[in-house]
Image: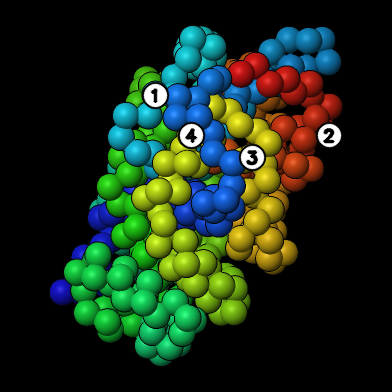
């Protein structure tokens, strides 16, 4: 049994899947919990030019969901129908073979010793529980670089949920229309690969720490997202691992600036884009709505 056993599970937005797990750092038992039947719908904005003409839409997605979560609405369906092009983080979500080959090429170059030695000793029990869930030996992930082990363990924790990801559903909706990607799988993986080892270990330990209550917390976060609870979701983006300035810049702020520039190029054409990226990218001064407003667009939340 080798580490490659888990490569076919690397589906969905790679970085988005990990971010979704890290955002659970704010979902403690003491946090206020949305109603079991959420009112409202997931966050959706429209982009208009100086003349007030709608030129595109921003939709904050979630990359993994429990079964049975209903997230579509008449407003969303209308925007999807009117859009000419879909813009996502990664378009090739179901190409497990290509993703596996890419992961192998990047993940095994220079592992700094046994993975157990890279794990915070206080998280040893939770780390062992993840290994048990994965049904592997303690040395199974030693050959991986730290970022790669973190990503793989995140996938172990949520492998049963990614098939419900909103991104892949929207990609199916746009079959026959143009689909563009802001990054692609290799760019996303290289964001991890370029992190200093200290930051990679922060990621690894955050993943392990957040998996203990994952099943409970993913449901809570899904309800926040489903209800369009902008206040609570925005609050989560500044907690946990994302409170680390270097990781916040690498995982969110820097990527958002690059996407805003790409989106402005898309908006300069006649085709109207429907942008579907992780909901964490929509909040605060570094969020896509604020960045597009700074570029002269009128951004209005429509649900």
**Disc 4 + disc 1, Cβ < 8 Å:** no
Q: Is residue 236 above or below residue 275?
A: below
Q: CA distance from mark 4 to mark 1?
A: 10 Å
Query: Residue 174: percent from the left, percent from the top?
Result: 41, 22
Q: Earlier in the sequence, mark 4 or mark 2?
A: 4
Q: Which residue has dot 2 on it?
A: 294
**Disc 3 + disc 1, Cβ < 8 Å:** no
Q: Earlier in the sequence, mark 2 or mark 1?
A: 1
- Location of the C terminus by quadrant is top right
- Location of the N terminus by quadrant is bottom left
The quarter holding residue 164 reads top left
Q: Is residue 59 visible?
A: no
Q: CA distance from mark 2 to mark 1?
A: 33 Å
Label 4 vs label 1, nearer the camera: 4
Label 4 vs label 2, nearer the camera: 4
**Disc 4 + disc 2, Cβ < 8 Å:** no
**Disc 3 + disc 2, Cβ < 8 Å:** no
Query: Residue 154: percent from the left, percent from the top?
Result: 39, 60
Q: Which mark is residue 70?
A: 1
Would you call the spot at circle 3 few (<14 residues within 10 Å), some (14-19), or many (20 or more)? some
Query: In this rendering, would 159 be left or right of 89?
Result: left
- Residue lying at 36% horizontally and 77% vertically, measured from the top left: 125
Q: Which residue has dot 4 on it?
A: 223
Query: Residue 295: percent from the left, percent from the top?
Result: 82, 32
Label 2 secondary element? helix
Q: Is residue 253 visible?
A: yes
- Residue lying at 65% horizontally and 56% vertically, measured from the top left: 239
Would you call the spot at circle 4 few (<14 residues within 10 Å), some (14-19), or many (20 or more)? many
Query: Residue 242: percent from the left, percent from the top?
Result: 64, 59
Q: Which mark is residue 232?
A: 3
- Residue lying at 49% horizontally and 9% vertically, measured from the top left: 74
């Amino acid at each position: 049994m080798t580490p490659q056993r888990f490569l076919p599970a690397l589906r969905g937005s790679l970085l988005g899947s990990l971010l979704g797990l890290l955002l659970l750092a704010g979902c403690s038992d003491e946090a206020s919990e949305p109603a079991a039947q959420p009112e409202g719908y997931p966050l959706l904005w429209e982009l208009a030019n100086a003349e007030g003409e709608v030129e595109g839409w921003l939709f904050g997605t979630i990359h993994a969901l429990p079964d049975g979560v209903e997230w579509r609405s008449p407003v969303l369906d209308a925007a999807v129908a009117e859009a000419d092009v879909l813009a996502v983080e990664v378009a090739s979500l179901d190409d497990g073979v290509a993703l596996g080959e890419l992961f192998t090429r990047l993940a095994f170059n220079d592992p700094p010793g046994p993975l157990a030695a890279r794990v915070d000793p206080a998280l040893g029990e939770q780390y062992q529980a993840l290994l048990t869930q994965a049904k592997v030996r303690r040395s199974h992930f030693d050959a991986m670089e730290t970022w790669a082990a973190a990503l793989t363990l995140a996938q172990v924790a949520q492998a049963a949920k990614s098939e419900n990801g909103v991104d892949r559903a929207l990609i199916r909706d746009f079959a026959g229309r143009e689909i563009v990607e802001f990054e692609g799988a290799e760019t996303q993986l290289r964001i991890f690969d370029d992190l200093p080892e200290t930051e990679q270990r922060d990621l690894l330990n955050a993943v392990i720490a957040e998996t203990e209550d994952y099943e409970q917390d993913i449901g809570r976060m899904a309800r926040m997202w489903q209800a369009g609870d902008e206040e609570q979701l925005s609050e989560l983006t500044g907690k946990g691992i994302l409170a680390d300035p270097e990781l916040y810049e690498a995982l969110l702020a820097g990527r958002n600036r690059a996407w805003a520039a790409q989106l402005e190029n898309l908006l300069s054409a006649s085709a109207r884009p429907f942008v579907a990226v992780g909901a964490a990218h929509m909040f605060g001064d570094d969020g896509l709505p604020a960045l597009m407003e700074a570029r002269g667009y009128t951004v209005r939340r429509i649900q």
